[in-house]
């Protein structure tokens, strides 16, 4: 329970940092990394599926309440991310940073694809930009500092 509380508190702080400071400091062509997606990937690697899904639901709801235009998008994406990472972690040892970074890149691409599909379903506009590569790059760069912050 203590470990869960620590992760929950750090997740709240990361979310607040993301919505207040991060988008101003690390914005590249209007795209900035998602600390919550990286955080949830680490949570999924550290906790069993049931606990990870609780984190994903809560932080997805938190993100959706902040960005009201795509309600339930983040809940759906976060639940998918956590489920996929939990399935993958049973087959690969993520003690090696390279595998974690590769997983973050994969999750970031999947996040962009799911977002594009959901936007397409809502607006009939499918949009993927080359600038989204910066999103993937920024997320992968932030993996190691977050992993160190969370005690690994």
Image (cartoon, grey):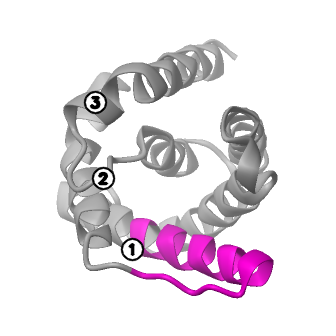
- Magenta span: 108-128
> Is 112 covered by the magenta stretch?
yes
Q: Residues within 10 Å of mark 3 (few under 14, many from 20)?
A: few
Q: Which quadrant of the view contains residue 151?
A: top left
> Disc 2 marks which residue?
139
**Residue at the spot of label 1:** 106
Lower position in the chain sequence, tag 2 or tag 3? 3
Distance between mark 3 and mark 1 Cα atoms: 25 Å
Local packing at callout 1 (Cα closer than 10 Å; few below 14, some 14-19, many 20+) is: some
User: Badge 2 local density, few (<14 within 10 Å), some, or many (20+)?
Assistant: many
Question: Residue sitting at 30 percent across and 53 percent down?
Answer: 139
Q: Mark 3 or mark 1: which comes first in sequence?
A: 3
Element assignment for label 3: helix
* Residue identified by numbered label 3: 24
| Contact (Cβ within 8 Å) of mark 2 with mark 3 | no
Vertical order, 61 against 79 (above or below): above
Residue 150 in picture, x, y percent from top left: 38, 26
User: Residue 106 appears at what percent x and percent y?
Assistant: 39, 74
Residue in front for this viewpoint, 25 or 109: 25
């Amino acid at each position: 329970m203590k470990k869960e509380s620590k992760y929950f508190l750090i997740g709240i702080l990361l979310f607040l940092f993301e919505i207040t400071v991060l988008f101003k400091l690390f914005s590249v062509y209007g795209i900035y990394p998602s600390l919550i997606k990286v955080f949830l990937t680490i949570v999924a690697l550290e906790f069993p599926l049931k606990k990870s899904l609780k984190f994903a639901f809560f932080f997805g709801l938190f993100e959706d309440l902040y960005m009201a235009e795509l309600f339930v998008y983040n809940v759906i994406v976060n639940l998918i991310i956590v489920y996929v990472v939990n399935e993958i972690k049973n087959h690969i040892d993520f003690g090696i940073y390279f595998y974690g970074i590769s997983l973050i890149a994969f999750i970031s691409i999947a996040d962009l694809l799911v977002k594009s599909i959901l936007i397409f379903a809502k607006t009939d506009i499918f949009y993927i930009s080359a600038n989204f590569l910066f999103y993937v790059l920024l997320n992968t760069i932030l993996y190691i500092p977050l992993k160190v912050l969370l005690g690994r």
